[in-house]
Amino acid sequence: MKIACTACDYSAALDRAVHPCPSCGEPVELHYDPGEIDPAAAIAGQGRQQGILSDLSPVLPPFAPTERVSLGEGGTPLVHLSRLGRRLGLPNLFLKYEGANPTGSFKDRGTAVALTQAVRTGYTLAGTVSSGNMAASVAAYAARAGLECHIMVPAHLRPEKVFTIAVYGPKLYRVEGDYSELYRKALALGRERGIFFAVSDEPFRVEGQKTTGYEVVRDLARLGLAPTHVFNPTSAGGHTAGLLKGFEEMAEYRAIATKPAVVAVQAAGCSPIATAFARGETRITRVEHPATEAHAIQNPFPPSGNRVLRALARAGRGAATAVTDEAMRRAQLALAHGEGLFVQMESAASLAAVEEWRGAGRLGPSDVVVLIASGSGLKNPGAFAPSDFPVADVRLDDLRWAIK
Ligand SMILES: *Cc1c(COP(=O)(O)O)cnc(C)c1O
Ligand SMILES: [Zn+2]
């Protein structure tokens, strides 16, 4: 097992926290030697709901049970969307409900692996740079592990979001200035001060993020199905990179016959990866004026953007695509009204993209389509105004007449 660059020939032993590549600046990742992981065993496992570090240990670094920093992440429901699927002519439409994770988003998978690695390599300080879900996740797991935690958030973060992070007791810094510059600076300061920054594409975090893909394959296999398409809301690109890495591993070890097409879904108002993909370019261009309310997928210069483009090219299928805020909101309400699932607006981007692809004939009834719903709608109740949903105010004596 070693650390290797996703773009150049650089590699390093695992005893240091190296990230990103000191030679070319692109993300590094974990490389396993043949036989060090066992994807077939991971897929055949039962999913005992004891956290990914236990349930999916065959495809993760060999952590001792006593070293695990876990809150029981993963093992999230794979929900069959029968009603929406019928409407769309997709009888095999499924949703992976990542809102069921301990802090309400898929970030907990990566945080569990990253902070376990931090603790076992002797770090006492952890941190991250985030505008929401990642910050809450790292703060929670740092509290769990007894690590001192340093969280950097952008200056404009809404107060109701700040509480969801601050409640875990981290040192919280609201930073004025360019967000992608903040990412680079924080990593440099982390190296200097001994802070393990569990950022979006930190290599151990990506090992955790790949487990979403393993669970999708495992849970569908029990129904006698295999995924043909996986749609994933994408910002920094860590989750999509993890999914692609997981499917590559499964195919390489012949645990699956064919890899599903992974579709990275971005917001039309900030879509550096989808734009580069549409133009056939191999490198992303910074988005100068992001214009979307979907803040969780609003990274104008995603650190794993080029890497996702490389992985999609290597996979030979899959795509990056963009949807409007309006389509996301419609999809969010369709999931709540039609299936009883309240997901974050950003998470509904995957359904919005599926609707578009189905309309364009890019998906058919024989496809097995999985929407990754990255986070819970309860994370962001402020997204709605009281007037969005009419409520009848009634006196008790009039209730009889009010029910219509
Ligand atoms: C972080 C996040 C994303 C984007 O994930 P990346 O790994 O940054 O691409 C999407 N949806 C939600 C709800 C998130 O919290
Ligand atoms: Zn490199």
Image (cartoon, rainbow, N blue to C red):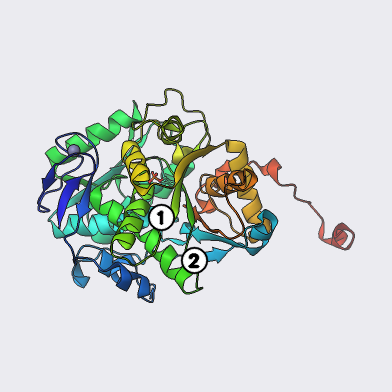
Label 2: few (<14), some or many (≥20) within 10 Å? some
Amino acid beneath label 1: Phe
Residue at point 37%, 33% (across, down): 154
**Pointer 1 with pointer 2, Cβ within 8 A:** no
Distance from Cα at disc 1 to Cα at disc 2: 12 Å
Quadrant where the C terminus is found in the figure: bottom right
In the depicted structure, whether residue 183 falls above or below residue 390: above
- Point out residue 232 in the picture as x, y percentages from the top left corner: 46, 49
Quadrant where the N terminus is found in the figure: bottom left
Which residue position is annotated with label 2?
77
Amino acid beneath label 2: Pro
Q: Under 8 Å from ligand 1: the CB of mark 2?
A: no
- Point out residue 180 in the picture as x, y percentages from the top left corner: 32, 31
**Residue 150 in sight in this render:** no
Q: Nearer the viewer, residue 321 or 256?
A: 256
Comes first in the chain, label 1 or label 2:
2
Q: Is residue 322 left or right of residue 336?
A: left
Q: How many marks?
A: 2
In the depicted structure, whether residue 61 falls above or below residue 31: below
Residue at point 39%, 64% (across, down): 257
Q: Under 8 Å from ligand 1: the CB of mark 1?
A: yes
Residue 282, disc: none
Residue 106, disc: 1
- Point out residue 166 in the picture as x, y percentages from the top left corner: 37, 47
Q: Secondary structure at mark 1?
A: loop
Quarter of the view holding residue 143: bottom left
- Point out residue 139 in the picture as x, y percentages from the top left corner: 32, 51
Q: Secondary structure at mark 2?
A: loop
Q: Is residue 199 left or right of residue 350?
A: left
Quarter of the view holding residue 142: bottom left
